[in-house]
Image (cartoon, grey):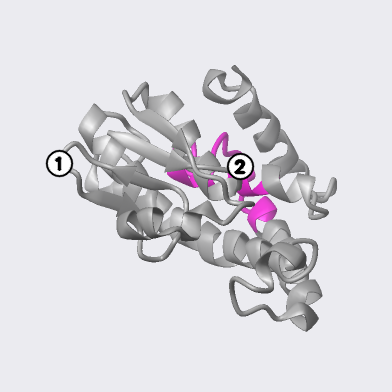
Amino acid sequence: MKLYTGMGPNPRVVTIAIAELGADVDVEEVDLMAGENRSEAHLARNPAGQLPTLELDDGSCLSEVTAIVEYLDEKTGGNLIGSTPEERAETRMWTRRIDLHVCENLGNGFRFAEGLPLFKDRIHCIPQAADDFKAIVQEKLVWLDGLMAGKEFICGDRFTLADILLFSFLEFGGNVGQPLDPKCERLQAWYARVAARPAIAG
């Protein structure tokens, strides 16, 4: 298998998952800044022109971080999704919530403001909406912080894809003017626990 990856929080999700799972995956960097992800060669792998993209041993390709991580989890016998139907449903529920409420809004807040020079000619941008997207992120993080009482990870005592997804985007947000509010004390403690994991700290 080969992972086509580059800068940004979505590729970070998959690289953390690979490290957690100990998966044997070759890696090839794609230059996002130079627009290499929009090249004919990459579009043949991923018509959406996005990163990351996982090329399987049979030459077919997977994109979208949740699909890639679930595939790698199954192939390696890992436990980032869950070992029972109930655990898998819980992981997918929280992954979906985090993706919709935090990741998508955080990403748009960046693309339409700090990232506008890079994205204005690549996607439809709404600069006037950037501050609103950023505000929604902070509101949802306060909401999530309130649900973290007594929990080590997003799904209780299980470290899952939901944690990797949220961590990757909060890490990115901290570097692009959307830091985690210090008043979210439970999420701050959660973030420190996740950052200390060998797959991340190492």
Q: Secondary structure at mark 2?
A: helix
Lateral position of residue 67 relative to residue 101, left or right: left
The image shows residue 76 at horizontal and vertical percentages of: 25, 28
Range covered by the magenta-colored residues = 144-170
User: At x 36% / y 42%, what residue is drawn?
Assistant: 69
What residue is pinned by disc 1? 58
On whether residue 89 falls in the magenta region, the answer is no
Earlier along the polypeptide chain: callout 2 or callout 1? 1
The image shows residue 128 at horizontal and vertical percentages of: 79, 82
Q: How many marks?
A: 2
User: At x 42% / y 31%, what residue is drawn?
Assistant: 27
Instruction: Tell me the distance, in whole angstroms, between the alpha carbons under discs 2 and 1.
Output: 32 Å
Amino acid type of the residue that numbered disc 2 sits on in the rendered structure: Phe
User: At x 31% / y 58%, what residue is drawn?
Assistant: 44
The image shows residue 164 at horizontal and vertical percentages of: 52, 40
On whether residue 157 falls in the magenta region, the answer is yes
Above or below: residue 26 compared with residue 72? above
On the question of residue 17 being in view, the answer is: yes
The image shows residue 35 at horizontal and vertical percentages of: 57, 56
What residue is pinned by disc 2? 167
**Mark 1 crowdedness (10 Å alpha carbons): few <14, some 14-19, many ≥20:** few
Lateral position of residue 118 relative to residue 18, left or right: right
Quarter of image, res 42: bottom left
Amino acid type of the residue that numbered disc 1 sits on in the rendered structure: Asp
Q: Nearer the viewer, mark 2 or mark 1?
A: 1
Above or below: residue 151 compared with residue 52? above
In depth, the one of 15 and 117 nearer the eye is: 117
